[in-house]
Image (tube, rainbow, N blue to C red):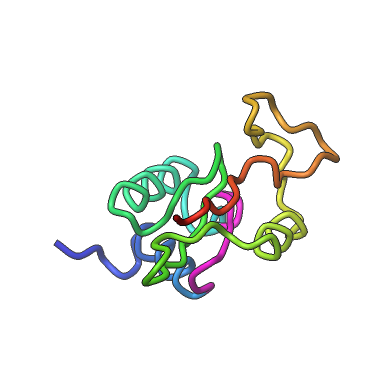
Amino acid sequence: MAKHPTSADSKILDRIRAHRRGWVFTPAHLADLGTRNAIASALKRFKANGTIRQLARGLYDYPVHDPVLGLVSPSADAIARMADSGKDISSFFSGSGRMVQPGESPLVAVRAIQRVN
């Protein structure tokens, strides 16, 4: 059954699609579209059906699908745009499992493109 066009899910999906594939975002980028719980639930559903991908705790992207490589990791530019968006990124976890401290780069939270053999 389709969601009502004014539901939080529909608004969130419209926002994600409007930014096009490769967009890196946090739930804070969607805060004006619903309650925290509604946004979290929608992101969980979109992650489960493959619409979005969770890169790290609180960090998502609308993945690019390459016909040869499959899912492509987000570009450094996309991550930099997200980091420069003015949203609070101080609670991201690094690849080592420790919290990224304010002033550190969130880039450590994203895996590099894996080598294709």
Quadrant containing the N terminus is: bottom left
The magenta segment is 19-29
Give the percent coordinates (x, y) of residue 114: 52, 50
Residue at the spot x=35%, y=67% of the render?
Answer: 6
Relative to 67, is 109 above or below? above
Residue 47 located left or right of residue 89:
left
**Residue situated in front as seen by the camera: 115 or 2:** 115
Q: In the shown orientation, is residue 116 left or right of residue 79?
A: left
- x and y percent of residue 75 in the render? 63, 62
Foreground residue, 74 or 8? 74
Image quadrant where residue 5 sits: bottom left
Lateral position of residue 58 relative to residue 1, left or right = right
Query: Which residue reaches farthest left?
Result: 1
66 to 9, vertically: above or below: below
In the image, is 80 to the left or to the right of 53? Answer: right
Residue 84 placed where, x, y %? 77, 59
- Count of number-bearing discs: 0
Q: Residue at x 67, y 57 (%)?
A: 79
**Furthest residue in direction right, as rendered:** 103
Specify the quadrant of the image occupied by residue 111. top right
x and y percent of residue 46 in the render?
A: 35, 53
Answer whether residue 21 is magenta in the image.
yes
Point out the image quarter for the C terminus.
bottom left
79 drawn magenta: no
Which residue extends farthest top? 98
